[in-house]
Structure formats: C-alpha cells, structure tokens
Image (cartoon, rainbow, N blue to C red):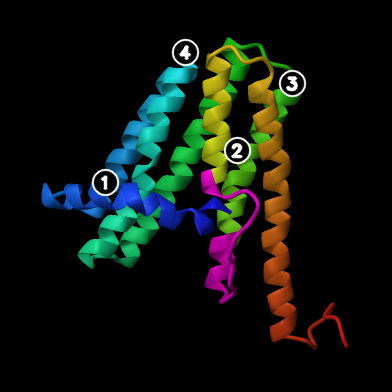
Amino acid sequence: MLSVHGRKPAAVVVEPVARGFLKVGLTPNAVTLIGTFVTIAITVTLIPSGHLFAAAVFSGVFAAFDMVDGTMARLSGGATKFGATLDASCDRITDGALFAAIIWYLIYFDNAHPATIFAALVVLVTSQVISYVKARGEASGFSMIGGLIERPERLILGLVGIGLEGLGVPYILPVCLWLLAIGSVFTVYQRLMQAYKQDRQENPKAPGAKTA
C-alpha cells in the first residue's frame, strides 16, 4: 500500500539525495549494490548478536537506497531493464537476509516460543511469494497493483519490531511478526485473485469461468 501512495511525499527527501549521488559519479546500479551489501552486513551481524535497535536504525537508513536508485535512474534517463531486474533481485536478497537473521535471533539468542518462530518463517516464505506472484502475473500481461503487505510495510513492521524489542518493549516482535504473517498470506491471496479475475475477463469461456 505504501509503495503506491507514499512515493510523492518521500520524493521531497529522496530526490535531493539522488541528485547528489549523480553529481559525485555514482550510478543507479552501484547504489543498488552498495545498499544491498551494507544492509545484509548489518542484518546478519547485528540482529543475531542481539543489537536490535542499532540494526533497525542502520538497516532502515540503507534500505532507503531502494528508493534512491530508482529516482537516480529516472533523473538521469538511464533506466534499463537490467537495472530493474537487479533492483528487484537485490530486494529479495535483503528481505530474505533480514528475516533469516530475525529467525536466527529468535532461535539461538531469544529462545522464542515456537509459534513466534513459525510466524517468522511464514513471513520469510511469503515475502518471496508475494513478489513472485506479481512478477509472474505481470509477465502474463496482468495488471498487479497494490496489496495489503508490500515491501515497505514488510520493512517497516519488521524493523519497528526488532527496534522496539531492542528497547525492551515486551511482546512487540511477536506481534509484528504475526501481523506480517497474516497480512502476507492475505496479500498472496489478493494477488492471485487479481490474476484470476483478469484471466476470467480475458477468457470468459475458459473452464471455471463465471457466466452472466
């Protein structure tokens, strides 16, 4: 949802940063890779060792590179299909690293309840499935717009959860993980239904199609 409605307000901050990076000679793809490597390094070192608040702050800063690189490509007129593919691939890697690190923390540092670990595993899997359904649907010619839990919501809830957990707020991480787990499963359903309805409109006589 935020990825649809939040880009214009964010542009006030993102565009000056993007222009600055372009002036010093950075390319959008370089910014994508820098943000990815640094974010992964932060999450896999700080979260499993229990430095949750620092991990949330630094991960949030570098995760913002996901908006900066796209803005750089637009401003420079250098947007490419490879750049879009690289950006999407790096997003999946950083999402996986974040929630894998959270699972590691829950199991080996926090001795969390199995239900909390289960919720985190659901988020880890569905975060990849949500993006895959969108990509596969768009490759089939469907319009896949919106969804309850997209990448911004996933990062915000995940980082807020570990940040407040690091500050000692009780039960906040399990609550955030369960919200994400339930919302992510629903988002997979949402996107599959988007594709299903559009397919029925294009092929009204196909098996299973509804007739008026």
SS category of the residue bearing label 3: helix
Instruction: Give the vertical position of 49 relative to 68 (above or below).
Output: above
Q: Is residue 75 magenta?
A: no
Q: Position of residue 94 (x, y in %)?
A: 44, 39
The reply, left or right, for residue 173 in relation to residue 23 is right
Over which residues does the magenta segment extend?
134-152
Where does label 4 land, which residue? 49
Q: Residues within 10 Å of mark 3 (few under 14, many from 20)?
A: few
Q: Position of residue 42 (x, y in %)?
A: 38, 25
Q: Nearer the viewer, mark 1 or mark 3?
A: 1
Which residue is found at the position 61% from the left and 12% from the top?
A: 110
Along the line of sight, which residue is nearer the eye, 164 or 90?
A: 164
Q: Amino acid at mark 1?
A: Val
**Could you give the CA–CA distance between mark 2 and mark 4, rounded to whole angstroms?**
20 Å
Q: Quadrant of the C terminus?
A: bottom right
Can residue 131 be seen at all in this image of the molecule? yes
The reply, left or right, for residue 203 in relation to residue 150 is right
**Could you give the CA–CA distance between mark 1 and mark 4, rounded to whole angstroms?**
27 Å
SS category of the residue bearing label 2: helix
Instruction: Give the vertical position of 62 relative to 18 (above or below).
Output: above
The count of marks equals 4
Q: Amino acid at mark 4?
A: Ser
Instruction: Give the vertical position of 13 relative to 48 (above or below).
Output: below
Where does label 1 land, which residue? 31
Which residue is found at the position 48% from the left and 53% from the top?
A: 6
Where does label 2 land, which residue? 124
Q: Position of residue 169 (x, y in %)?
A: 62, 15
Q: Earlier in the sequence, mark 1 or mark 2?
A: 1
Q: Tell me, yes or no, whether the two marked residues, 1 and 3, touch with CB atoms within 8 Å.
A: no
Which residue is found at the position 78% from the left and 84% from the top?
A: 206
